[in-house]
Amino acid sequence: MEYTVPLLSIICMAIIALVGIAIPVVLFLIFRKNYKADVLPFFIGCAVFIVFALLVEGSINMLIFTSSIGKTIQSNIWVYGIFGGLMAGLFEETGRYTAFRTVLKKKHGNDRNALMYGAGHGGFEAFYILFVSMASYIVMAVKLNAGMQDTLTAGVTDAAALQTLNATFAALASTPPATFLMSIVERIAAVAIQISLSVLVWFAAKNGGKLFWFFPLAVVLHALVDAIAVILSRYISNVWIVLGVVYIFAAICVLLAIAVLKKHASGKGTAVKIETAGIA
């Protein structure tokens, strides 16, 4: 079957890709110029996401999901959602904590660096999800419209992989153009959550002691929002309802981070400024 992707869909995908570049750049500039945060935490945040989320967590998930245990996990949406959420929470928050306790230990004097780190971690995730994925979809869509579908499936001998490709072709061709833009709405909430969790783990790593519990709290919150999003997506067809729940969760995380900053930040000006401008 041949597929044709509407031009407007390709334009929307291009907009998403550009937003994927803009999010980390804008966040970097805001926290650097307005909040006087250091540069290093941003790039450490990017590196931690690559190493802990994409490489380590991704490799372990691949091993698990290609095994018989993985098939069992994927057969139950509740188990799949909770498992995926826990894996993301454990690896990403452990990566955060490790970075704050090691390479960023000398940056503890400026609590705004927690925000800059979050901008790097969440910003690179946005870049990866929005830009990288949309760039590949745009290439795919252009080839489909040029009648080059065979070049996309050439060399694919696995029946399951071929079925997945065809499902992707069908989705690109049938999805309403505006629907693609919803990924931007989702990423805004996700970045706000990433920055908020960075604040919690920052003080867990910096102060330790009675504040160490912020670290496991961040793991639980991360796991919870991921699990909820996956599970709700299975039972609720209206994506806006799912996004609404995610935004409520994001708002809770942001308010919690603001409260933590107001109480524990070294400089009072930090908390006041964040409360006025908003973390996200």
Image: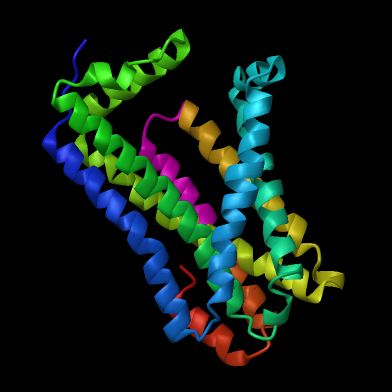
Residue 275 horizontal side relative to residue 201, left or right: left
Residue sitting at 49 percent across and 84 percent down?
A: 35
Task: Identify the residue at the far right of this view.
Answer: 209
x, y percent for residue 224: 63, 45
Q: Is 118 placed left or right of 263 in the picture?
A: left
In the image, is 224 to the left or to the right of 23?
Answer: right
Taking depth in this image into account, of 236 and 129 the one nearest to the observer is 129
Among the 4 quarters of the image, the one containing residue 71: top right
Determine whether 39 is above or below 145 in the image. Answer: below
**Residue 206 drawn above or below residue 266:** above
Q: Which residues are magenta?
A: 235-253
Camera-side residue: 126 or 74? Answer: 126
Rendering coords of residue 255 (x, y %): 56, 68
Type of secondary structure dominating the magenta stretch: helix
Q: Where is residue 269? Give x, y as percent.
A: 56, 91
Say left or right for 211 vs 37.
right
Question: Which quarter of the figure has residue 5?
Answer: top left
